[in-house]
Amino acid sequence: MSFHGLRQIFVPLGDDLFRIAGRAIQIMKWDQNHQFCGRCGNSTETMHTEHAKVCVKCGLRCYPRLSPATITAVIKGKRILLAHAGRFPSKLYSVIA
């Protein structure tokens, strides 16, 4: 068994499973990063009635952050403009986000 990043398994998963896996990773990271209250420092508990964590002491609720992004494809005829960031592997290109 080996670990693969989400981008590496995009094609085998297909669109629907890729979206579900991406959302699961976001929720998992949010849960890991919000074990303690940002206001008073006490521990938080997961709320089962909504996607939130609540501080056991002061009651502050914390919700997963929404980070919308715009993806743009610049197309001219049969050509498309792709970007290559310095941190990308050598043959990886992306549309502009």
Image (cartoon, rainbow, N blue to C red):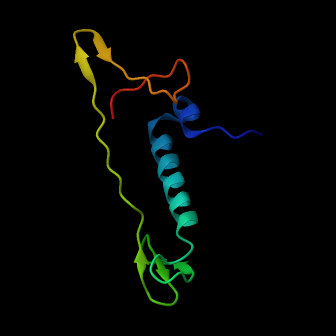
Of all residues shown, which one is farthest toward the right?
1
Residue 24 on image: x %, y %: 52, 54
Give the vertical position of 33 relative to 46 (above or below). Answer: above
Residue 27 on image: x %, y %: 50, 59
Q: Residue at x 43, y 23 (%)?
A: 84
Q: Quadrant of the C terminus?
A: top left
Residue 51 on image: x %, y %: 43, 70
Residue 8's quadrant in the figure? top right
Give the vertical position of 71 relative to 55 (above or below). Answer: above
Taking depth in this image into account, of 56 and 18 the one nearest to the observer is 56
Of all residues shown, which one is farthest toward the front?
86
Q: Residue at x 25, y 22 (%)?
A: 74
Taking depth in this image into account, of 35 and 8 the one nearest to the observer is 35
Of all residues shown, which one is farthest toward the left?
76
Give the vertical position of 56 relative to 48 (above or below). Answer: below
Q: Quadrant of the N terminus?
A: top right
Give the vertical position of 79 relative to 49 (above or below). Answer: above
Residue 69's quadrant in the figure? top left
With 79 as the anchor, is 3 left or right in this view? Answer: right
Taking depth in this image into account, of 56 and 49 the one nearest to the observer is 56
Q: Residue at x 50, y 78 (%)?
A: 37
Residue 88 on image: x %, y %: 52, 27
Of all residues shown, which one is farthest toward the bottom?
57
Q: How many marks?
A: 0
Q: Residue at x 53, y 35 (%)?
A: 7
